[in-house]
Image (cartoon, rainbow, N blue to C red):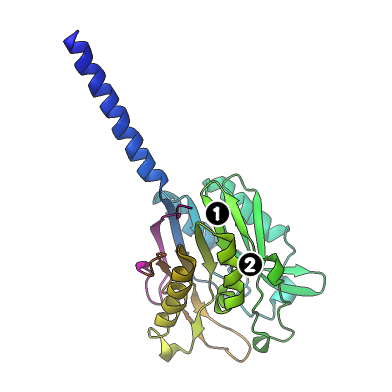
Amino acid sequence: MALRRILGLIFVSSSLLSYASNAGESASVKVAICQILVIDSDREGNFRRIEYALVDAKEQGAQIATFPESAILGWENPEAHRLAHPIPGDDSQRIQNLAKKFDLMIAIGLDEKDGDRLYDSAILVDRTGKLLWKHRKINVLPELMSPPYAQGRPDDISVIDTEFGRIAFLICADTFSDAHFDRIKQLKPDFMIVPYGWAAKSQEWPEHAKELEKIVGKRAKELGCDVVGTDLVGVMSAGPWKGYTYGGASVAISGAGEVITRLRDRDTEVKLVKVHPRSH
């Protein structure tokens, strides 16, 4: 009898430890920040680099893979007026197929053609390849391309309910607007993902990375949740910012405003970070 009681206690203790361990694991989400090289108009090359990054993300045990702004055709690239597809469309479908292939949720920026309008958009795709959400950038910096990107609607800002929690989703310069963040705060996300195209003159790097860290940190503290900002590596090929450099330096910052991780300066990298959805 005594032996049975001891064995029973061992079994219960093991079960509780297992439960506690699983609970601890479920309290965080493994996000791969995919800081890739993006070359303007090089659709096939950019897709190849996206897939290489997904291989790394999967090997590191990621659940979500995040990518930069305009990762298929390049940001503020006038050629996108001719090359971009609708969403849903060929490019978004390829991302959906990759999400299913690698069993990963994917957040990525890509240009979207809708009639004669070009949008700077981003999509969130679940692990089964389902398109969960599309956001059209609102603060499009029209002075950088002619004709400029069409603007998204502030009323369309939302938070997406997913298996990993409630995810907020904006694009780069959208994070500059207090009004947009007032809307996000009301929706109480668990964490936030932002694709960035963070560019500056080459001599302004790596100092310019501090500005990215500053804006991501400010918004993380205001929201009270973790924020992941994914930048790219490369060079702008057209417009008044032709020759400006994307310096990488992607960053994840906690809701307390503390840096969780930074990625390399002016180099590609895929790095896993544990994001902790906040409790409501």
**Residues in magenta?**
258-280
Image quadrant in which you'd find residue 94: bottom right
Residue 224 lies, in percent from the top left, at 45, 64
In this view, the mark in front (1 or 2): 1
Residue 259 magenta:
yes
Residue 130 lies, in percent from the top left, at 65, 48
- Under mark 1, the amino acid is Arg
Residue 241 to residue 176: above or below? below
Image quadrant in which you'd find residue 14: top left
Quote the CA–CA distance across marks 1 and 2.
22 Å
Residue 204 lies, in percent from the top left, at 42, 89
Callout count: 2
What residue is at 41 percent from the left and 80 percent from the top? 209
Residue pointed to by mark 1: 166
Residue 241 magenta:
no
| 220 on left or right of 242 | left
Of residue 4 and residue 110, the one placed in the foreground of this image is 4
What residue is at 38 percent from the left and 86 percent from the top? 207
Of residue 177 and residue 274, the one placed in the foreground of this image is 177
- Residue 125 appears anywhere in the view: no
Residue 210 to residue 187: above or below? below
Image quadrant in which you'd find residue 277: bottom left
Residue pointed to by mark 2: 110
- Residue 80 appears anywhere in the view: yes
| 171 on left or right of 266 | right
Under circle 2, the secondary element is: strand
